[in-house]
Amino acid sequence: MKISSKIILTAFGLSILFPRPLLAESPDDFFKRIESEYDSFKTQANESYNSFRDKVNKQYADFMEKPWKAVETVKPLAPPDVPEPGPTKVPEDKDPLADPPAPVTIIETVTTPAPAPQPQPVEPIAPAPVVPGIEPIRMEVYGTKIEIPGTDFSSFRLRPGDTSSLAQGWRILSQRQTNNLINGCLKVRDELALPDWHYMMLLDAVADYLSDGRENEKTMITAYLLNQSGYDIRLAYERNSGRLHLLFNSSGILYRRARYKMDNRWYYALELPKEPVVVCDFATPGETPLSMAIAKVPKLDFKPGKTRTVNVHNHPDLVLTMTTNQNLIDLLGDYPEAGLTSSENSQWSPHATMPASDEIRREIYPVLREAVKGLSQYEAVDLLLRVAQSFPYEYDDKIWGKDRVFFMDESWHYPYSDCEDHAINLSHLIHDILGLPTCLVSYPGHLSMGVAINDGSAKGDYVAYKGRNYTMCDATYFYAPAGSTASSYNNSSAVLIPVN
């Protein structure tokens, strides 16, 4: 007697029908046969999973063999010149709030885009069989140990400037031996919450290890891993030397970096080419620009950095102490000069939108929340302004030799900071402690900030934006109350950067 109904098994989002066994088949034989058929099905599913990706990689390699396109190197973009007039101190005989409130005139508003999900492969990358004898890649990412499946590239060689050799190199990289490597890199990115820029740095380090430092091979491996991870990149080589270069597209703007315009998109060189370049301008379906945002605090192991104590001006009982994570400080130190939009005035938005670290939230915020209890919003804002004004000031040129914008944790780590850093630090404190919307306000030669006080207690100078008045708070107008603007700053011409 036969049973004609079916057993339905589902895997990889697909369904497959297996006939029920004849009653004469033993249970052991049945399960062995089902396991064998299911293993065969998984193999077929894995192959179909990668069929589209394989097709795209084949098209990419075939495109590489064609002549590459000459592109013009565009002069690097310099960040806006922000000559710092230095801190201003309130005259002892003046009440900064005595004059009528003065509105700030805005000539440009730089809106900050909402964080987007990080890029993903064009389709899921199926695991490949583990090759015996291949050791995993073990390294540290900003003091945090990681392990990634390895692969053998000891014989991987490219002939400089030879498009056939470069195409063959892409075909070699497209073999299954790199599947586990790509998945391993993406797993580290997600587990450590690495921003796109630092993920690219990770892949560059992995490629350096796999290529044993050979420049062209390293560049192609980095480009391949980024491309397979879903990022919008291009390969280029110098016409004469054949030196290979990685170009990456960004949704924001990068300063002081060689750039190229293709299909109305800006691509930046990871390393500066010394000669004119030609580009393999192949577009991968779904490719996504690198974001310069740091939307999450990276999850790095803790290494004690500097222990900082801030004695709040005019509040002798309010003393703030914290120890920064040196690993996070090192990561932030590798961030390039960049903005989150195409506006040249977006250079402060990455720093103003990155969340405060766990160390700040654990060691500083509870003390400040207790300090502002029972105060009106204006009084609480004024107290937090005093906190920011208690950070020692120094010029970037003197400390760093150039303009250097701090992320909030850097202001709590380094002994000195300037007007940009004070404003960004204060913006975080007010938003995170009081939950009020804030904005940065860029005057010619100065950065300040504003807060939307909504309980009727606001006073002093303000900037109007979307139906709200943002009370001006200047962390380097020592020790002026909230609502004060130094007379040296021109209220008739400013750029507004809403940050939350």
Image: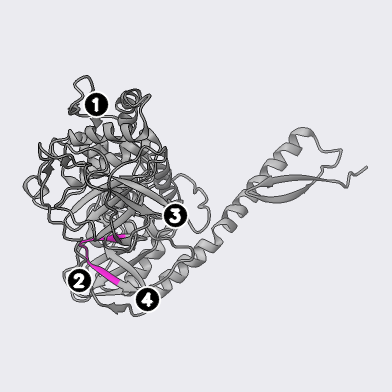
Image quarter of the N terminus: top right
At label 2, counting other C-alpha atoms closer than 10 Å, the crowd grade (few under 14, some 14-19, many 20 or more) is few
Instruction: In the displayed orientation, state which residue is furthest to the left.
Output: 398
- The region drawn magenta spans 253-260
Return the residue at label 1.
322
Marks 4 and 3, how far apart at CA: 27 Å
- Looking at the picture, how far across and down is residue 452, in whole percent? 37, 44
On the image, numbered disc 3 is attached to which residue?
Answer: 119
Q: Nearer the viewer, mark 1 or mark 3?
A: 1
Q: Position of residue 286 (x, y in %)?
A: 48, 63
Mark 4: which amino acid? Glu
* Three-letter code, disc 2: Lys
Task: Give yes or no for contact between labels 4 and 3 (Cβ–Cβ under 8 Å).
Answer: no
Q: Is residue 73 one of those drawn in magenta?
A: no
Kindly identify which numbered label has been placed on residue 189.
none
Bin the neighbour count of mark 4 within 10 Å (Cα to Cα): few under 14, some 14-19, many 20 and up: some
| Label 4: element kind | loop
Q: Residues within 10 Å of mark 1 (few under 14, many from 20)?
A: some
Q: Which residue is mark 4?
A: 65
Residue 200 lies left or right of residue 17; in this view the side is left
4 or 1: mark nearer the eye: 1
Residue at point 60%, 51% (across, down): 43
